[in-house]
Amino acid sequence: MINTVTFPGLGLEFTLNRVALTVLGRPIYWYGIIIVSGLILAVILCSRWGKRFGINEDQILDMMIFAVPAALVAIRAYYVIFNLSIFQNADGSLNWGKILNYGDGGLAIYGAIISSVIVLLIFCHVRKISFLAFADLGVHGLFIGQLVGRWGNFMNVEAFGGVTTLPWRMCGPSIAEDMLRWGYVDQAGYEAILSGTLGVHPTFFYESAWNFVGLILVYLVGRKRKFDGQCFLFYVFWYGLGRAWIEGLRTDSLYFFGLELFGVPIRTSQALAAISAVVAGAVLLFLLLKRGHSPEKLYVNRLAAQRVAGAAEQECQGPDTTEDGDEGSEDTTQKEKNEEGRGED
């Protein structure tokens, strides 16, 4: 499917084809290519930065073996759970064909984030690795994956916001049709979007830019961190803060089982983002004020101290030698005594 997207205020126009290429008769979508590219870039950069957190490349790759399949399931499950009605048959049973049809759309990044945290907890427990140190490194990868991955939404012309006349408004025929079908505009609004006088918020770009700034900040935090888990808490705070704002602009939000707060339907991801931002921000502030700077307590420095102590202990013990020479001397003396005894007889 080919879409035309324009940014009239910026003088930009794009012709977008969701399909990048066809292999053996099956379409390969730009969305998938962009997501995989973000994942690969995240792994490469985290592998380079891992030493600062005491995490090596093998541990990162081993973790990804478990995290990626779990994320593929969770990213869909999160969407299905909060959109259950469209995945049910007339008798109320689940339509597994629709649920497993990833190409039909419907993925939620929060599902992948939650599953990654759970998998990392289990992985670190089994491997005897610091969860907080690994999480500090991992959130760098999350920022990278998300800032790149959001451009997949652009290629699909989805995840956009409500109407606006801002200079960077986004317009296009498919956008106008969606906004009319969803009831966000009337016929006049539909025509205004087609003409370019009215557009929608490019929320995919807002989130990508927010994550880019977050990546720079968390990188700086990581270099000066006071305790393990500081980068992780910063990510939860920063991403939650931005997502709570951006989600409020979107037109395709998931809603929390029809519940309302002060007469307003609760957007699932917005509520989760706001709560997590408040909690993480409070915990981060408390720990920063309570804890002094103790570099020796960081996991990476504790590992280094253990290696130094182990090397020192081995050096004190010296080489592993035996008393073969002494034993040989004792055997010779005893033999001589025996021979002297026989001579007397």
Image (cartoon, rainbow, N blue to C red):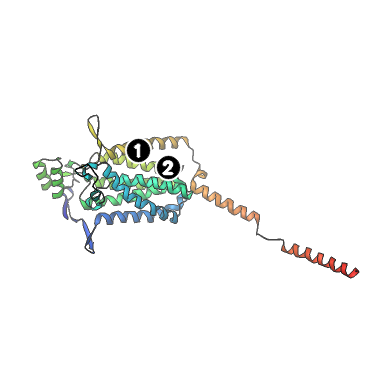
How far across and how far down the image is residue 94, in percent? 24, 45
Identify residue for label 1: 276
How far across and how far down the image is residue 250, in percent? 22, 42
Q: Is residue 62 visible?
A: yes
Kindly report which numbered mark, 1 or 2, lies closer to the viewer in this rendering: 1
| SS category of the residue bearing label 1 | helix
Amino acid carrying label 1: it is Ser
Q: Quadrant of the C terminus?
A: bottom right
Q: Residues within 10 Å of mark 2 (few under 14, many from 20)?
A: many
Residue 87 versus residue 324: which sits nearer the camera? 87
- Depicted 312 relative to depicted 268: above or below: below
Q: Report the residue that reaches farthest toward the right.
A: 344
Q: Residues within 10 Å of mark 1 (few under 14, many from 20)?
A: many
| SS category of the residue bearing label 2 | helix
The residue positioned 29% from the left and 44% from the top of the image is: 78
Which numbered disc flags the more N-terminal residue, 1 or 2? 2
Q: In the displayed structure, does residue 232 sit left or right of residue 333?
A: left
Corner quadrant of residue 190: top left
Q: In the displayed structure, does residue 340 sit left or right of residue 57?
A: right
Q: In the displayed structure, does residue 164 sit left or right of residue 46?
A: left
Amino acid carrying label 2: it is Gln
Residue 148 versus residue 158: which sits nearer the camera? 158
Q: In the displayed structure, does residue 311 sit left or right of residue 6?
A: right
Residue 56 versus residue 234: which sits nearer the camera? 56
Q: Which mark is residue 230?
A: 2
